[in-house]
Amino acid sequence: MEKTVYIIGHRNPDTDAVVSAVGYATLKNLLGYKEYKAARAGHLNPQTAFIFEKFGIPRPEYLPDLVPKVKYFMQDKVETVTADVSVWEAIGKMEKTEIRVLPVVDSEGKYLSLLHYSGFARGVLTILNPEKKHRFSTSISLIQKTLNAQPIYIAGDADKTFNASIHVGSSSTESFAKRLEAHASEDIVVISSDREDIQRICIEHKVKLLITTSNCVIDKELRELAETNKVSVIVSPYSTSPTSMLIAYSMPVSVMGDKEIVTVHENDTISRIKDILKNAHCKYLPVVDDENKVIGIISEHDLMKEPNVEVILVDHNEITQAVEGIEHYKIQEVIDHHRIGSIPTKNPITFINRPVGSTSTQIAGLYKEYKIPIPKEVAALLLCGILSDTLILQSATVTDTDRDMAEYLSSITDLDIRELGNEILMAGSKVGGRSASEIIHQDMKEYTEGKLTYTASQIEVGNPQEILDRKAEFMEELAVERRAHKGLFSCLLVTDITKLSSVLLIDCDSKFIQFITFPKMEDGVYYLQDVVSRKKQLIPLITEQVLNYSN
């Protein structure tokens, strides 16, 4: 498959992560790089979903993980052959491609079997074995095409298949006539040279097909007799020996196809198919879709190549926050505005990380750097990203760069900053009817300090009391999350967008409680005056407490 470069934000993506991916992928496309594609590593939260619906913009592709899959390694440019094509024609197709196998399909393109050299070699050797009497399925038209033979007279349907009993007319007329009589009940095909006596015996015995070799044509009298007796006659350009060899290849590929080869699907993981591929006779597996139609081929050799996927990370740079499986792919770039975490790369990369309030601010700035006009719908998304991540330019993380860029995007879109900001914040602040698990996971990030890990979620609401009234439910879910991550603690920052302060709910190891220095409201609940930013305010403060605990 052609290479795809996914531009993707962190797990449980917020608005800034999703719109940044869309904005940067659009910029890459406008610069002429069509392989770049926006993606998201989680479902859209209510605020982000509202924004995409408001502006009528398609959501980016959902990638729940980047665990190596068949579609990232398979070859999608693969020839197929229908079941009624001769083995000889199929070999010709295989010789012209790098893939030494050929999927056999029906008239609708659905997979039937796999043709490979070892498979049809066994079949041909069986037919050519002089110790065994063997008949094989073919048709007059397949024989004619395989031999490049000249038709003289064709009786009946040339495309109708039959079980051919092959004989070479090289013995005496007496013994040959006896042989034909012994096989009278079979569909006999005779290969004859220029011997008129043998030709006449064949026609008189009403064989199915007479093949004369070395371009020898029967005389007019015999031709008339052939028409009377309904005996088909064709002329091979080859001598008797190569004609006898080639005729075996006139079988339809449906006879030679290996039906034991297992098919796989594009979303099957590589770990699942490795043993299947290892045990396949030809070390190739056909890839089919849900309708069993062939869409590709994968081989052991393909697994040794680089995958056809690379990534650009936006709005994060820590491995614990990245989509699962990211370590298997080349990271081209990182564009972020958070602390520098640990995400190792094999090669030097472009790494843009500025202390601004939003990744969307940086993406919009790149349009300016490349002197590319921002499409109006993209400008609207990026403006929403800035306003969401900075609480309408009121967060402690906001910079003059964010303010200037918001004004610039507002001018392009003719959208009022305050009105739009309030609209999107209210869309994301609704908690009624939503489970504690959904709210905690909609914007959750995992952090690592030394050997310790913890998770921090955030939600912005108009009234934190809606969360506090369901404290038991949220504390139970935080405990589940902490155990799942084997972490020191899991917390939820509930930010009051009207008072620009927050309440922190935290479930933690009992030994860590004494290191928490925030004003305590009740067990597991703390008040954080003027704290609205997880990135710039909560994480630095709580990291200090974690370090004190670890020391």
Image (tube, rainbow, N blue to C red):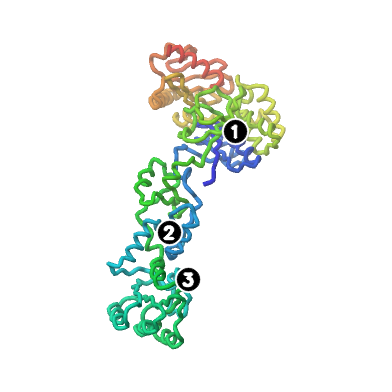
Compared to residue 279, the image places residue 210 above or below, namely: below
Name the N-terminal-most of marks 1 and 3.
Answer: 1
Marks 3 and 2: CB-CB under 8 Å?
A: no
Task: Residue type at mark 1: give it.
Answer: Ser
Q: Could you say which quadrant of the image residue 454 lies in? A: top left
Compared to residue 209, the image places residue 442 above or below, namely: above
Q: Position of residue 280 (x, y in %)?
A: 36, 50
- Disc 1 is placed on an element classified as helix
- Disc 3 is placed on an element classified as loop
Label 3 crowd bin: few (<14), some (14–19), many (20+), radius 10 Å? some
Q: CA distance from mark 1 to mark 3?
A: 62 Å
Q: Position of residue 40 (x, y in %)?
A: 53, 36
Label 1 crowd bin: few (<14), some (14–19), many (20+), radius 10 Å? many
Label 2 crowd bin: few (<14), some (14–19), many (20+), radius 10 Å? many
Between 348 and 442, the one lying in front of the other is 348
Taking the spot 43% from the left edge, 59% from the top edge, the residue there is 105
Q: Which residue is mark 2?
A: 104
Q: Which residue is mark 1?
A: 20
Mark nearest the camera among 1 and 2 is 2
Q: Which residue is mark 3?
A: 148
Between 307 and 453, the one lying in front of the other is 307
Between 330 and 225, the one lying in front of the other is 225
Q: Residue furthest bottom?
A: 221
Compared to residue 457, the image places residue 188 above or below, namely: below
Q: CA distance from mark 1 to mark 2?
A: 45 Å
